[in-house]
Amino acid sequence: MVEIERKFLVNSDAFRQEARHTFRIVQGFLNRDPERTVRVRLKENIGIITVKGKSSNDGLTRFEWEKEISKLEAESLLKLCELGVIDKIRYEIPLRNHVFEVDEFFGDNKGLIVAEVELITEDEVFVKPPWLGEEVTGDIKYYNSQLSKEPYNTWEE
């Protein structure tokens, strides 16, 4: 139940041709406390509730628990969420032994594209595709819970 992941900005649209699956995701947060985030997600017609613990100091690991719920339950819980719903398209891109999840955001986060890769160990080696840009692992402003509160389009440049 420990999640190890690295997060990167995306520097080109080349990832689109490599995607094997795409999904629309709408998500909200019942709780955005950094100690314990509670997220409700509607991924196409599947509901998911997720509890995430506090990230490690380097942002690589944190506790994560997920449970599938019905679409109706997810829709009902989304109505109870704090302001700031996240709307995005997720592209799943297999590359050797890993799957990169690239999220293209819409609404107040339009223009932001972020890629994540889950790892088995913190020091696991993986192939970086050419469209992978700057690493932002551990940078809290790129967490979805933070993007729902302080959207990308409100950032100072």
Image (cartoon, helix red, strand yellow):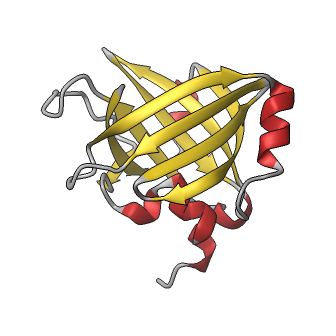
Left or right for 26, reference 115: right
> Residue at 47% across / 29% down in the picture?
65
Looking at the image, residue 34 sits to the left or right of residue 87; the answer is left
Q: Is residue 89 visible?
A: yes
Q: In which quarter of the image is residue 45?
A: top right
In this rendering, the answer to whether 40 lies above or below 152 is: above
Front position in the image: 8 or 83:
83
For the residue pair 94 and 107, the one nearer the viewer reads as 107
Quadrant for the N terminus in the image: top left
Residue located at (41% from left, 39% from top): 116
Q: Residue 51: where, in percent of width, then height?
A: 51, 39
Whole-percent x and y of residue 137?
31, 52
Identified at 33% across, 56% down, the residue is 136
Kindly identify the residue that appears in the image at 87 percent across and 29 percent down. Answer: 72
Above or below, 107 against 128 in this view is: below
Q: Residue furthest bottom?
A: 156
Q: Position of residue 3 (x, y in %)?
A: 34, 32
Relative placement, left or right, of 108 versus 124 is right
Image coords of residue 129 (percent x, y): 34, 34
**Looking at the image, is 96 positioned above or below residue 101?**
above
